[in-house]
Amino acid sequence: MPKIILKEMTKAYEGNPAIARVSLEIEDGELLALVGHSGCGKTTLLRLISGLTAADQGHIWIDGVEVTGQKAEERDVVMVFQENLLFPHLTVAENIAFGLKMQKVPRKKRTEKTKEMLELMQLPNLGKRYPAELSGGQQQRVALARALALEPKVLLLDEPLSNLDPKLRDELRELILRLHRELQMTTVLVTHDRDEAMMMADRIAVLYYGKLLQVDQPVNIYRYPAAREVASLFGQCNFIPGLLKDGEFQTEDYRFTVPALKRGGRVEACIRSEHIKIARPQEDRPTGVILEKKYLGGQGILKIGVGNLIFVARGNNYFDLDIGNQVSLDIDWSQVSFTKGDHFPGDQTSCG
Amino acid sequence: MKNLKTLRAIINLMILMVIVVPFLVLVVWSFSQGWPTNALFPKEWGLRGWSYLFSPESKMLSSIATSTLISLTVTVLAILLSIPAGKALGVYEFKGKKVVEIIVLAPLIIPTITVGMGIQIVFIRYGLTDTLLGVILVHLPIVLPYGIRIFASSYKAMGIKWEEQAQVLKAKPWQRFWYATLPFLYPGIISAGVLMFNVSFSQYFLTYLIGGGKILTLPILLFPFVNSGDRVIASGLGLVIVAVSVAFMVIVEKIISSPEQETNFYYL
């Protein structure tokens, strides 16, 4: 049975829907990443689960019990905010024990739990310090420890890594994953970082202007995006409209043989930039002129104009090629996904 | 560079003059016996002023007690009232907020005489004139704007994120206030408390109007001496008023600010 069930949740701020009829099931022990552009309802959805925000409509069950009307302090859910919000007037140990103290857990037990948490977070001997004396990474660990000390059924993380520098981010990401595996805690993670979502999540839920576009495993999100918006959220895509028919993908100028597919009719091919290889000019392949060239350290990005289309290809550094050269595109069609040509009908103005 | 230093020195000196010299004059006056108008220093020195003040007939000690009791009660009540009011103005958006803001600030702008007359008529009807309670009640609206302003800005700066953090850590409403919010308000409580205590402590007109001369606070005691020109006693009393105010400020600071807060990183 799923740990969290959301049914038709809706929340609007001053008439603008932030979350529109979202239904979602989160499995026990799962790490689900909520992904989307900033301001498109991720944090609102997290707040709805936590109980900090009450939904306008819809129902929510946690562990089989309906908690729709329960306040945040009554739900067995703890949220870690983006800013770590450690109480500056309390020591690290007092911060970690805060939740236990609020629940009137005896002091002796609190002390034990705090010690256990400090060890788990690899922060021994820091209990007597004040948050201002810690580094950003240590502060975020304490915030995590403070949440975990309550042993919640569900842990909600609102962009816990976004305020950290890359090295600390890697460390803390590994720590969160390790804790998640050890403690078997159902975790919902909000992030706008697609790599973070891909690396950490068991499943990814893509939110777009308050609506759920797709909920699936990272691999499927990447390989079979349900909509153009999902595809472009997870990497650079060349969207080519065309007709899918008899094992062929037909554009205005070219016909491509593609692997057998169930879908047919007017579609949009999402060709990822990393699935286009550059070849010598060949007659049966789309051929065009290099318009732009960029280096990304280990990789290079080429913009190639083919007819009235512009393709972006990403691969090795193409040292032997330059702007103006004629090249052909070698597209790996086994990796290409097709979506219905029409765009997701998201109301662009409703994004708050 | 050198010019700037000179300028700074001059400004410092001017500030010193404005603040310290009036004090020195008060001290000198209070220990004088007679001070002819054209003399730089008093001709005779003596303790007439001080010995009168500390004699029972001056009623100084009892009016210190009355004044302190009134101002302390007013300050405590005003803080209790202005914290929720400040939260409402600092955090929440509601219809008519602008109007409420103006009403709250009105006592600072409207002359107390205008309000005082109306209040007196009402208080006579309810038998509140000539009573301690009446004086306390009439001081409240005068000091409240200071507290509400200060707490509104405290709340505006801190937002409700700390309360929410406490809430997800299972704190009930009163626990959220006590453990998460209150520590952030300490600096505001100190400044609002000291300000409100002093405004109440030095209030003459309303105390006189409502207290009817029966409630003897220090300013009420002071006025006749200023009026009759007995500067020796008036100066002594003035110093006593300053001393009590300063003592209150020091005590409040000592009680409320704890050692770990001395980094004062969240002083507003």
Image (tube, coloured by chain):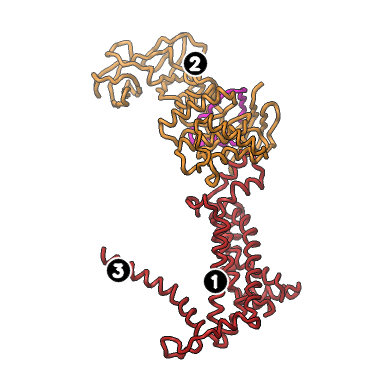
Chain colours: A orange, B red
Residue A194 location in percent, x, y? 46, 27
Label 1 SS = helix
Q: Which mark is residue B112?
A: none
Asked whether residue A292 is drawn in magenta, I would say no
Depth order, front residue of A168/B30: B30
Residue A65, compared with residue B27, is above or below; it is above
Residue named by callout 1: B243
> Which residue has dot 3 on it?
B6
Instruction: Sort mark 1 into few (<14), some (14-19) or many (20+) by Cα contacts within 10 Å.
Output: few
Question: Residue B256 falls in which quadrant of the image?
Answer: bottom right
Tell me, for residue A265, which label it has, or none.
Answer: 2
Residues at marks 1 and 3, common chain? Answer: yes
Distance from disc 1 to disc 3, alpha carbons, whole Å, reads 34 Å
How dense is the environment of label 2, judged by Cα within 10 Å: few (below 14), some, or many (20 and up)? few
Q: CA distance from mark 2 to mark 1?
A: 90 Å
Q: Residue at x 65, y 79 (%)?
A: B59
